[in-house]
Image (cartoon, helix red, strand yellow):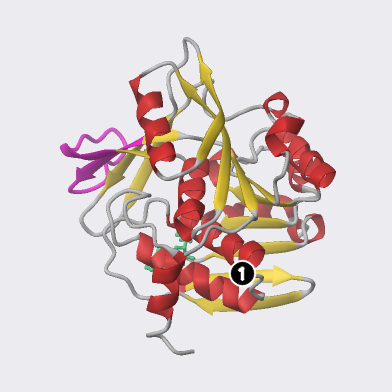
Amino acid sequence: MEQTSALFLSVGDIDVDVLIQVDRLPTRDGKVNGSLLRRTPGGMAGNVSVALSRLGARVRILGRIGDDSDGEFALRGLEAAGVDTGFVAHLGGATTFSCIGLLTPDGEKSLVKLMTPAYRPNAEDLSDRVSQGVSHIHLTSVGDPDLCRRVVEAARSVGAGTSLDIELADCPSDASDFFDAICGFDLVFCNSESRQAVDAMLGGRLTEAVRSVVTTLGASGAEVETEGLRFFSPGFAADVVDTTGAGDCFAAACLYGRVVQCYDWSEALRFANRAAALSTTGLGAQSALPTAAQVLESLSHHQM
Ligand code: ADP
């Protein structure tokens, strides 16, 4: 598929995922045996940028890596996927962010984030130079309210759209901090876990703060609430190997559908559900990311 002129900026975490196979997830005080399946480049911002690039979009990433071999490994993965890494900061003395994934044979999964100062960029890192020429900014962490505000402000100054992925592990605990952080984004992505937490915290004010909210529902699909309307789009069956990063592929495909292809919401959700289902058929977040042609081809076998 031809490269398009829209330029996406993906802001957030770049990491190395360490995927470990276990028979069962450890219980409290429990110990289980595991075997290393794969070390693979990841991070939500990394995954979204690679997924967008694979779909045929132009992508720049703003993030940080440490001064170590993991950082080099993560960076090489992004570059190989065609992502512009010119604004990835190398943090001296810090380790690259890493995420341990425990996977069971029946598809259960637990993640441990190994936090580091290189986890995500800060508001100052998002200079005017970074957002120059950008059509859409996607932020993968709601944990730093200043960075959230800066994304919205930078996007306004260049006429770009904005989206934010709300991950439960990153949510501020104070409801008013949280509300301020999300205010002004055009689009927010939640999974069912983070959506429940957001509703418990904001009591239904999420849709006041942002124009559109997409909630992904695992294998069941996804729904969008926008301008007082709600649409549901069912998921697609897949020969699932690993669901790590399915939400990131979904977000990338939904943005690609809306921004590049100008799809309406039902087309965008269908395209994103199909892309995300395909992404679950490989180990790790990035090994089975589809091209736009592959998504369209497989959708052509599934008439509405
Ligand atoms: P996250 O990965 O962020 O926790 P979800 O689990 O909701 O988010 O998955 C995101 C999207 O990935 C879903 O909306 C769906 O399109 C797709 N997906 C996830 N799990 C499966 C699955 N088992 N089979 C098919 N598609 C899936």
Q: Would you place residue 70 above or below residue 93 in this image?
A: below
Query: For the point 29% across and 43% down, which residue is it?
Result: 102
Q: Would you place residue 166 above or below residue 119 in this image?
A: below
Q: Position of residue 162 (x, y in %)?
A: 71, 51
Q: Position of residue 236 (x, y in %)?
A: 40, 75
Query: For the point 42% across and 51% down, which residue is it?
Result: 245
Q: Position of residue 197 (x, y in %)?
A: 61, 52
Q: Which residue, as the protein is rendered here, is positioned at the far bottom? A: 303
Q: Would you place residue 80 above or below residue 109 in this image?
A: above
> Which residues lie in the magenta part?
17-39
Task: Give the residue type that dot 1 points to.
Answer: Gln
Q: Is residue 125 left or right of residue 29?
A: right
Q: Which residue, as the protein is rendered here, is positioned at the far front? A: 2
What secondary structure is marked by label 1?
Answer: loop
Q: Is residue 147 visible?
A: yes
Q: What residue is shown with label 1?
A: 261
Q: Would you place residue 168 above or below residue 230 in this image?
A: above
Q: Is residue 177 visible?
A: no
Q: Quadrant of residue 81?
A: top left
Query: For the point 43% across and 57% down, which residue is it?
Result: 246
Tell me if residue 25 is in the magenta stretch.
Answer: yes
- The mark tally for this picture is 1
Q: Position of residue 264 (x, y in %)?
A: 66, 76
Indicate if the residue with disc 1 has its beta carbon within 8 Å of ligand 1.
no
Viewer-side residue, 196 vs 270: 270
Q: Which residue, as the protein is rendered here, is positioned at the far top? A: 93
Viewer-side residue, 159 vs 208: 159
Viewer-side residue, 124 vs 242: 124
Tell me if residue 129 is in the magenta stretch.
Answer: no
Q: Circle 1: is it few (<14), some (14-19), or many (20+) Cα within 10 Å?
A: few
